[in-house]
Amino acid sequence: MTSRNGRPPEKEVYQYDAPWPVYAMDWCKATTADGYRLALGSFMEDHANKLQIVTRSDLMDDRRDYFDPTRQDFLPLAEVDSYYPITKVLWEPRKSRDSDILVTSSDCLRVWELQDSPTRYDNSITSRRPYREPLQTLSKRAELLNTKQSDFCAPLTSFDWNVLDPSLIVTASIDTTCTVWNVETGQAKTQLIAHDRDVYDVAFMHGTSDIFASVGADGSVRMFDLRALEHSTILYEAPPVAATPSSSNFTSIISDGAQPLLRLQFNRINHGLLATFSMDSDTVQILDIRSPSTPVAELKNNHKNNVNCFNWSPVNGSQICTGGDDAQVFVWDITQNSENLHNGNRRHPAHGPILRYEAESEINSLCWNQTLPRWIAVGFGRTVQALRM
């Protein structure tokens, strides 16, 4: 059975089995078929990590000579070595040139350019090459290092790329700092001590180029404004770790009694909302910057083990997707508690998820496609799946 354009009908799930454990992941921001490209980063303890670009193989009409019956749903387009594990990868927020720009974080911030291989469109008889030869190339354009710490660069745990002003990137590091970079000039705009301990994640507030927030091992969500960096706002502090025999010794050591917060992300539609979760927790807190200190909603009682990742919907401000160690992927609608979003006096558990999917093992990463929002990518072990909503 084929569709009108001659291709097979779209599947519910497309799968790619990478040659290494997948951790970092991001969809391309293109609105065309290029939007089905995924950037994948490995996370291995040795020094043989990779950054790879893949795309749906059924959309590669211009490369039918690459097709064979045993091909995977995704075709590798380009690959490059990364000495250290990649903690995050992002495509450029808005494509403004013929080539594509990506940024990765690991020991430092690296800027990559993705271009077509010189012989990709060579149709001569002698130009036919093996199936696995990359169709595109990744070349390193820049390494962004803080010159004050040229002798030692503290590992970067995360970063975010400003959509309103794509020249700005903010990074988070285990040395307690956040650094705002001008990616066009390669210069640090400012660096600040953001937390008392390691910083685990950082994100710009959507709709602004000045405001960002961070979370870390000290268990707090802190918000900063580039126009007034002498002040910061503590939006939320996680309750201290309960002193029980089952408490994680690792958690106690790195946090000095606080409950570390691992991730945060601002809502793409309702800019005042953000989500976060704690280490060793099965619950996601929804915060409103207009009502700090107390979550306006909590997503709980469904994940049976730790939450590892989440992503807000790019088109529906009430929906968020979560993934965890229980191999479950949930999509929640927080407006099922709409009255709670305007009441910061007490915590309110959200109703159950509206969609669910079970993978084969623990979900380590997920990404909601911003330009083709019917698709969510999830990563577990060496496997990446693109799920159609």
Image: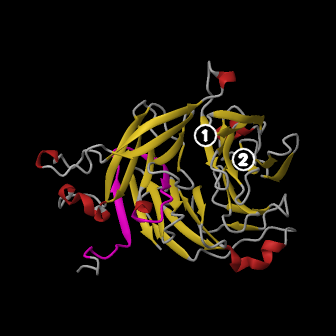
The spot of residue 246 in percent (x, y) is 66, 47
Q: Residues within 10 Å of mark 1 (few under 14, many from 20)?
A: few
Magenta stretch: includes residue 9: yes
* Type of the residue with mark 1: Glu
Read off the residue under disc 1: 184
Q: Residues within 10 Å of mark 2 (few under 14, many from 20)?
A: many
Asked whether residue 76 appears in the rendered view, the answer is: yes
In which quadrant of the rendered image does the N terminus lie? bottom left
Residue appearing at x 51%, y 72% in the figure: 356
Asked whether, in this view, residue 175 is left or right of residue 26, the answer is right
Disc sitting over residue 101 in the figure: none
Location of residue 207 (image quadrant)? bottom right
Residue 191 % position (x, y): 74, 34
Q: Earlier in the sequence, mark 1 or mark 2?
A: 1
Quadrant for residue 8, please give it. Answer: bottom left
Q: Residue at x 50, y 54 (%)?
A: 26
Q: Residue 15 versus residue 126: which sits nearer the camera?
A: 126
Colouring method of the image: secondary structure
The answer to whether 316 is drawn above or below residue 274 in the figure is below
The reply to whether dot 1 and dot 2 touch (C-beta < 8 Å) is: no
Q: Which residues are magenta?
A: 6-33
Amino acid under disc 2: Val
The residue wearing badge 2 is 215
Relative horizontal placement of residue 250, taking residue 376 as reference (left or right): right
**Secondary structure beneath label 2:** strand
Q: Is residue 249 visible?
A: no
Label 1, label 2: how far apart the Cα atoms are: 26 Å
